[in-house]
Amino acid sequence: MTKILELQDVTKVFHIGSMISRLKITAVDHVSFHINSAEIFGLAGESGCGKSTIARMILGFEEPTSGKIIYRGKDGKPVAGKEVWRTAGVQAVFQNPFETFNPLRQVEHYFFEAVHNFRLASSHEEALARIDKALEAVGLSYKEIAGRYPSEFSGGQLQRVSIARSLLTEPSLLIADEPVSMVDASLRMSIMNLFRELIERFGVSVLYITHDLATAYYVCDRIAIMLRGNIVTMGDVEKVLVEPKHPYVELLRQCIPEADPRRRWTTKVQLAESEQEEYLRVGCKFAGRCPYVMERCKREAPRDVYVDGVLVKCFLYE
Ligand SMILES: Nc1ncnc2c1ncn2[C@@H]1O[C@H](COP(=O)(O)OP(=O)(O)OP(=O)(O)O)[C@@H](O)[C@H]1O
Ligand SMILES: [Mg+2]
């Protein structure tokens, strides 16, 4: 299997607050994982655990404080302030399609603009063919979008249009940060199925970021679960979610009604400590909420261990 993208020991530190009360937040704390070609890799966890920060670093909007992001075997370090590798090969699908497009602009302009910017065609006919092909991949056609404004589409349709726009450059990786949370529940699965179809047809990979374990379970091959900047467990989606090893996943699963991972996870996990307290913890970040907490967990950070092929960061397994 080919690795499309690899994060090696990536850390991102933010400094917030005034000069006097400056607070250091390690939003992403020594994170390593890779995404294979033609797979959906999930990144899940509660709000604020660092998912979007990872997405922003992969897309080059944010630079890691330390660590490496390797795309197709090449270090993705920005060159003279410009990402050299991000442009065509890695594309983003954002949460709210209505924010992706300017309401006063016909959506087709975005397509022609991308064709122009990436020099994807040498004539108008060629551009049209390219645009039609991208739209066809999401079950639409150029005819269906021509002359239309964002408000003339449903949320689900517009998200498809946005995905088609990302496909124009024939990327090898789509970064989808909460791509269906603004989409009607009835259409959510059709977008998830579309991702699967794109993988089968074009061999793209998808980083699917979500706080919704049910859709993650439905669509992902492998998954990483984050807690306060750390990946606490990672592996085959079935093994990570259905036979949870890390106590945090057990807790997350209890928040899915009727313990059915296919159902949507709506309730927010009860926070035992403030977000800041948890971030600043020296030991395991979950120690304050863990039913199995030991003295050691409060003092030391657990190492990564492998249990049944699944990475688990927990002293229960050391
Ligand atoms: N530009 C920034 N400056 C300061 N702090 C930031 C910045 N961006 C993110 N953070 C902080 O980093 C942490 C992780 O944020 P991030 O947006 O990555 O979380 P998330 O997992 O995507 O959450 P959500 O599920 O709510 O989207 C949060 O505590 C957030 O406040
Ligand atoms: Mg986010």
Image: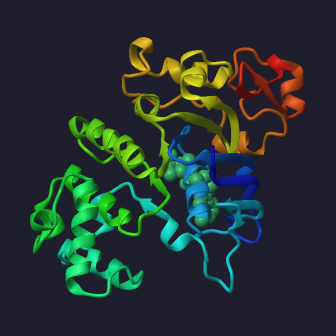
The answer to which of 69 and 141 lies nearer the viewer is 141
From the top left corner, tell me how far across and down residue 256 is, in percent: 44, 21
From the top left corner, tell me how far across and down residue 189 is, in percent: 29, 36
Position of residue 264 relative to residue 20, above or below, is above
Residue drawn 42% across the image and 34% down it: 219
Coloring applied to the structure: rainbow
The answer to which of 250 and 292 lies nearer the viewer is 250
Q: Is residue 259 left or right of residue 185?
A: right
Q: Is residue 147 left or right of residue 108?
A: left
The answer to which of 290 and 7 lies nearer the viewer is 7
From the top left corner, tell me how far across and down residue 235 is, in percent: 64, 30
Q: How many marks?
A: 0
Q: Residue furthest top?
A: 258
From the top left corner, tell me how far across and down residue 32 is, in percent: 73, 47
Position of residue 71 relative to residue 43, above or below, is below
The N terminus - image quarter:
top right
Q: Is residue 61 left or right of residue 131?
A: right
Residue drawn 10% across the image and 63% down it: 144
Residue drawn 14% across the image and 66% down it: 145
The C terminus - image quarter:
top right
